[in-house]
């Protein structure tokens, strides 16, 4: 039977995340669909508030099935995401701006990013798994992206390039790397093609993501204008979480001094200084 504690939930932007999902994140097991949905929705709202003139559009989804011979696929958007351009893709390029699509997607049991320059029709694919460990070729990933763009935007890219910086040796790490990379792009304003995400930067997000999720839950942040701002989570808050929320992560594991230590996340939030940028 299911452990009732593992089914306890917090909510941010209408997305429910269980204690088990937070435990899995901190134990290096996986970054769940809901955690990715939460953070990419957070970034989407961050852009709306802090950089409304920048034409960057975020779409998060999973690939249910891909037929590489027929070049057809089925996709499921993560909670709260949808494609408002499906019936009017021309709206993406009607202005003089150079819009970019950020496609955050799960395929071959890991998270990837495809960044599409709509006007130039160029695609840049970010895969953090070392190529020697991948079960999927670069060509197949590009085919998945092209199929999504064709089905959702009636668009066909003309060229593709791939991220060639430091890579991970674990499938389960890719979600954290993706989140850190996106934060570097949207919050840190780093170059999409030249940045390199270190293992230390990735590990920082094992603390930042649960903290941000719980903080959002506590503040009732469902409105995009009420979300906690990045300048407020450069260091972890001194606020002690209520017992019922702290209990969500009473068995979470965090790295301290090179070893794993079991701590209450509430104590971690009170004492551990973790920088996002």
Image (cartoon, grey):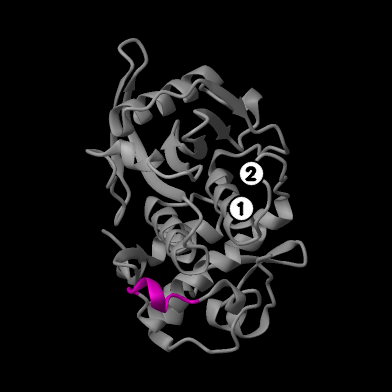
Residue occupied by mark 1: 185
| Left or right position of 95 against 275 | left
Q: Where is mark 2, residue-wise?
A: 192
x, y (%) of residue 17? Answer: 36, 64
- Does the magenta segment cover residue 226? yes
Quadrant where the N terminus sits is bottom left
- Quadrant the C terminus occupies: bottom right
Taking the image as drawn, is residue 253 in sight? no
Q: Are marks 2 and 1 in contact (CB under 8 Å)?
A: yes
Residue extending farthest left: 87
Q: Residue furthest right?
A: 257
9 w.r.t. 78: above or below: below
SS of the residue under disc 2: loop
Q: Position of residue 6 (x, y in %)?
A: 36, 65
Of residues 90 and 67, the one nearer the viewer is 90
For residue 30, say whether it is visible: yes
> Around disc 2, counting alpha carbons within 10 Å, would you say few (fewer than 14), some (14 to 19), or many (20 or more)?
some
> Counting residues from the N terminus, which is met first, the one under dot 2 or under dot 1?
1
Secondary structure, mark 1, is: helix
Q: Nearer the viewer, residue 187 or 87?
A: 87
Q: Would residue 272 be counted in the magenta stretch?
A: no
Across and down, in percent, residue 122 comes to 54, 28
Q: Residues within 10 Å of mark 1 (few under 14, many from 20)?
A: some
**Which image quarter: residue 167?**
top right
Q: Residue at x 50, y 71 (%)?
A: 212
The CA span between labels 2 and 1 is 6 Å
Q: Nearer the viewer, residue 110 or 188?
A: 188
Q: Which residues are magenta?
A: 222-228
Disc on res. 243: none
Seen at 58% across and 79% down, the residue is: 232
């Amino acid at each position: 039977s299911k452990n009732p504690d593992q089914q306890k939930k917090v909510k941010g932007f209408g997305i429910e995340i269980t204690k088990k999902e937070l435990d899995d994140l901190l134990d290096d097991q996986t970054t769940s669909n809901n955690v990715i949905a939460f953070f990419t929705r957070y970034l989407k709202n961050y852009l709306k508030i802090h950089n409304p003139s920048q034409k960057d559009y975020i779409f998060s989804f999973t690939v249910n099935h891909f037929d590489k011979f027929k070049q057809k696929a089925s996709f499921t958007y993560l909670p709260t995401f949808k494609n408002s351009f499906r019936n009017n893709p021309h709206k993406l390029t009607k202005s003089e701006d150079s819009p970019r699509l950020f496609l955050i997607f799960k395929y071959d049991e890991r998270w990837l990013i495809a960044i599409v320059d709509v006007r130039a029709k160029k695609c840049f694919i970010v895969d953090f798994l070392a190529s020697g460990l991948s079960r999927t070729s670069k060509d197949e990933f590009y085919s998945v992206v092209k199929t999504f763009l064709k089905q959702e935007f009636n668009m066909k890219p003309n060229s593709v390039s791939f991220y060639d910086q430091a890579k991970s040796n674990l499938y389960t790490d890719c979600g954290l790397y993706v989140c850190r990379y996106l934060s570097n792009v949207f919050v840190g304003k780093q170059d999409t093609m030249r940045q390199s995400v270190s293992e230390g930067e990735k590990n920082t997000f094992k603390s930042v993501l649960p903290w941000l999720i719980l903080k959002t839950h506590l503040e009732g942040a469902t409105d995009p204008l009420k979300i906690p701002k990045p300048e407020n989570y450069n260091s972890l808050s001194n606020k002690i979480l209520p017992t019922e929320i702290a209990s969500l992560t009473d068995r979470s594991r965090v790295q301290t001094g090179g070893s794993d230590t079991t701590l209450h996340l509430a104590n971690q939030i009170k004492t551990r200084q973790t920088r996002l940028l």
